[in-house]
Image (tube, grey):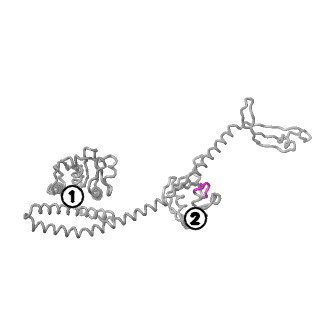
Amino acid sequence: MNMLRRVGEGVSVKNHESVRKRKDGSLFYVSHSLSPIKNEKGEIIGAGCITRDITRRKIAEEAVKAHDSLLSAVIEGITDVVFVKDLRGRYLIINSAGAESIGATKGQIIGKTAYDLFSSQIADQITDTDRQVLQTGLPLTYDETITVGGIERTYLSTKTVYRNIQGDVIGVLGISHDITERKDAERELIKLSRQKDEFLSIASHELKTPITTIKGFTQLLQKYLGGKDKNLEGFLRKMNLEIDRLTNLVNDLLDVSRIGAGKLKFRQTEFDINALTNEIIEDIRLAGTRHQIMLDGEINNMAVGDPHRVGQVLTNLIDNAVKYSPNSDKIIIKLGRNGEIAQISVQDFGIGIPDDQKSDIFKRFFQAHGPGSKAFSGLGLGLYISHQIIHQHGGNIWVESEEGKGSIFYFTLPLKK
């Protein structure tokens, strides 16, 4: 009646939407357009009405509204910064987390550019990454540090192009995760690691002098007292072996500090890998191992590298084979080649390495545990140092192992061409 009253006053009503009920009780949406009907005198005598069923359109609009409402709820619920900018760098959308990170309200940010919100230096930085994304059309992930109100925060940000329904690029979509605490923790870990390496280096150097002195006096005692007292001679021999073991531990600590500082020295030369392997085996036999060390194969070409460091790797692997096979008495060393690459393996028949420890076996200070979490002696540095040495030679080192059946450690070295 209100619309008819307005038409009676000469006013047309266009696209008035309302809901109607069908005879079966179901509802549907309609749009009415009414206009006055006049007689030949220009007097309004009625109304003409066009009614259209717009149910499908309204359902689609409601679906879009529901989708937009859901999307808005999701974006607002995210604790990371989420934003959308147009091609001119103006913010079209930003969530509450983003507004809070800037120290403003969403209303104060929408429609503004980075230059309105940040210092020129930070705005240049932000705009440059926007430009890269728009030029390449590819996602970009990077760390960025932003200072707002004197507070510096670090974000892991990802930006990508924002497209309309037709697929045209109309802006930049971004999400930023605050990683300030993680970065601070990483910097603190680096600092502590550096301090630890410095301590190891200083302590190792300080230990070398007294150990060398003790070693010298032990050898003098062996010279003057050897043969006079069998028990004393045995004690001195045991003392000498333990001093050698302590010397090796100190040398390992020194090597770790050198590796951390990038100062592990190598003397590149050509050497006979067969002779070196035999020499290492003989030294270990003289030390009194009960294990039978068998050598299989030979390499005719000269190897290229530092024989002292390669010997260190072989010694570490054989010592580990002895240590981790307490119930076995056999170790097999194989020498072979694959083209211009030498391949050496050391096999034991000991406790093996559990699957959950294999990925950590070459890490610094990691020690494999036997059955029942039994720990073996050592600092857990031998395999780490060996890995670094072989890597510096351009070779590879890896392990194949089955728990309870033993392990095979392989490493490769370049051969003389």
Helix, strand or loop status at disc 1: helix
Q: CA distance from mark 1 to mark 2?
A: 59 Å
Q: Position of residue 118 (x, y in %)?
A: 58, 64
Q: Which amino acid does the dot numbered 2 rest on?
A: Phe
Q: Dot 2 corresponds to which residue? A: 118
Q: Is residue 95 magenta?
A: yes
Q: Position of residue 110 (x, y in %)?
A: 63, 57
Residue 168 appears anywhere in the view? no
Q: Is residue 24 magenta?
A: no
Vertical placement of residue 211 versus 159, above or below: below
Q: In the image, is 118 to the left or to the right of 266?
A: right
Q: Dot 1 corresponds to which residue? A: 311
Helix, strand or loop status at disc 2: loop
Vertical placement of residue 36 versus 315, above or below: above
Residue at the spot x=43%, y=61% of the render?
A: 186
Q: Which amino acid does the dot numbered 1 rest on?
A: Gly
Q: Which quadrant of the figure has residue 272? A: bottom left
Q: Return the mark for residue 93.
A: none
The one of 414 and 114 positioned closer to us in this rendering: 114
Q: In the image, is 58 to the left or to the right of 36?
A: left
Q: Position of residue 34 (x, y in %)?
A: 81, 40
Q: Position of residue 278 (x, y in %)?
A: 15, 55
Residue at the spot x=23%, y=58% of the render?
A: 310
Q: Which residues are magenta?
A: 89-97
Badge nearest the viewer, 1 or 2: 1
Residue reaching furthest to the left? 228
Residue at the spot x=49%, y=55% of the render?
A: 140
The quadrant of the picture occupied by the C terminus is bottom left
Q: Are marks 1 and 2 in contact (CB under 8 Å)?
A: no
The one of 228 and 256 positioned closer to us in this rendering: 228
